[in-house]
Amino acid sequence: MALRTLFSKKAFTTASGFRPIAAGDRCFLRQSRGLTVAALPDLAYDYGALEPAISGEIMRLHHQKHHQAYVTNYNNALEQLETAVAKGDASAVVRLQSAIKFNGGGHINHSIFWKNLKPMNEGGGEPPHSTLGWAIDTDFCSLEALVQKMNAEGAALQGSGWVWLALDKGSKKLCVETTANQDPLVTKGANLVPLLGIDVWEHAYYLQYKNVRPDYLKNIWKVINWKYASEVFDEETA
Amino acid sequence: MAMALPLAYASSVVHPFEAGRLSFSTKSTKHKKQIYQFRKVTKVLAYYGLTNPPYKLDALEPYMSRRTLELHWGNIHRGYADSLNKQLANSPLYGCTMEELIKTTFNNGNPLPEYNNAAEVWNHDFFWESMQPNGGRLPWGGVLDQIEKDFGSFSNFRDEFVRSAMMLFGSGWVWLVLNTNERRLSIVRTSNALCPLVWGDIPIISLDMWEHAYYLDYKDDVSKYVNNFMDHLISWHSATARMVRAEAFVNLGEPKIPVA
């Protein structure tokens, strides 16, 4: 049976009356005492379905522990923010910003990441065609060149962060960007829409690839969900 | 497996030797012959060696496994040292101690490409020496007195250190430093490769909070890693030695002004 995360959803979903609401930024949200809070999204595949590119153990920890922690801490920060705003406590509002940016960014980034991945037997790794394929050929000369560029930037990233294939909504051009820690892509440009994001935090690959990040980057392309990237691209360029 | 380096804890630095600099005009013929013989010697460049941790790789079990040390020291730390030497092969930076190299390459906040590698080599050296088998428990003597003076009590210090470690976003380090301006101990968090040496503080103890330092042993349980470090790994011997050295640069005592 599919390893859905129903078992792991802890306090937030056990109370009655809460149901998921899909929001515009594609993060599952719930209503709780009038405050809309985030919830851990389900994966569309089993934890072990991405092997051998990404091990089931990493997927389970990454989803159930790391992403869940971001969701929990983001919600805590939101509640504290709500209180601070209601009280008019400006210094508390400002103090909470880094926790919101980090944990909220972590939630946003990982929600996109799960959709960027697909098991090989369900179409993961299949190269993009039509509109997105042509755009890649135009902006990067070839898919291989794009992959090489993203791998190079991902490997060169110091510390923790993400490497993105982004669409600039204004110029309708594709570009490769990196962000540090859990900064979402919009921190690099308000016009940037994430098509693909690759997590290069060590927790995303260390158990399997140890410190050889380039091997992780080489292999992850086998499970990349180009279909999702194409859908987002077509939506934004319509 | 580990390189068989002698157990010297200071990074070895060799200065370049350039025979071409000698002037020939006033030298005798015999002397000139000797100089010409020297010219055949290969130019030696600065080279930073990878130092061994001061204990066997399995000595920190079960709090830090041999496998973690094999990868962390053998691959990651070694990788930084190799990258640094490769970068320095064509660089005008040579003849520096590691600390000088870090401060120079930090370039007052606009780091040069060598900074990351240099700082990470030093940071990891410092980290291995901040730990010991059968470590942890309490400091003693001057270090304990200074901690109690600056934090109120050892348990306050311990709580603050753990809290600081848990609050770090992303990769980085947590340090107990001697703040040279305020002349007191304090706890600082730094991101990625940043090292308190660059702003003049003197590190006493460090804890590597990059995920590679604990992920194999603790997965996502960061709190257990930090607590185990405090209780079982931290080397108060090293801290004492570093404090003694630091006091040569920072006067921690109260001036004894005689009262008339």
Image (cartoon, rainbow, N blue to C red):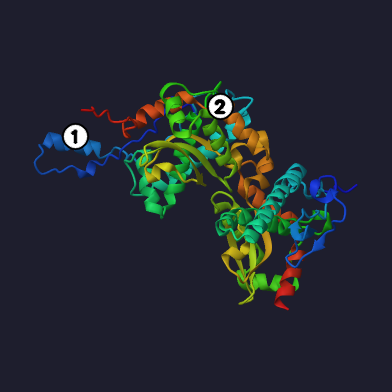
Q: Position of residue B145 (x, y in %)?
A: 43, 26
A192 and B235: which is toward the camera: B235
In the displayed structure image, the side of residue A106 where residue A189 appears, left or right: left
Residue plotted at (43% across, 48% down): B115
Instruction: Classify mark 1: helix, strand or loop.
Output: helix
Instruction: Name which quarter of the figure residue A78 lies in.
Output: bottom right
Chain under label 1?
A: B
In the displayed structure image, the side of residue B156 where residue B250 appears, left or right: left
Residue plotted at (40% across, 29% down): B242
Q: Is residue B18 visible?
A: yes
The numbered mark at residue B34 is 1
Separation (CA) of disc 1 from disc 2: 55 Å
In this view, the mark in front (1 or 2): 2
**Are dots 1 and 2 in contact, CB under 8 Å?**
no
Instruction: Classify mark 2: helix, strand or loop.
Output: helix
Instruction: Name which quarter of the figure residue B162 lies in.
Output: top right
Looking at the image, is A231 positioned above or below residue A73?
Answer: below
Residue plotted at (67% across, 47% down): A204
Residue plotted at (67% across, 37% down): B221
Q: Amino acid at mark 1?
A: Gln
Looking at the image, is A110 positioned above or below residue B72?
Answer: below
Chain under label 2?
A: B
Mark before the other along the chain sequence, 1 or 2:
1
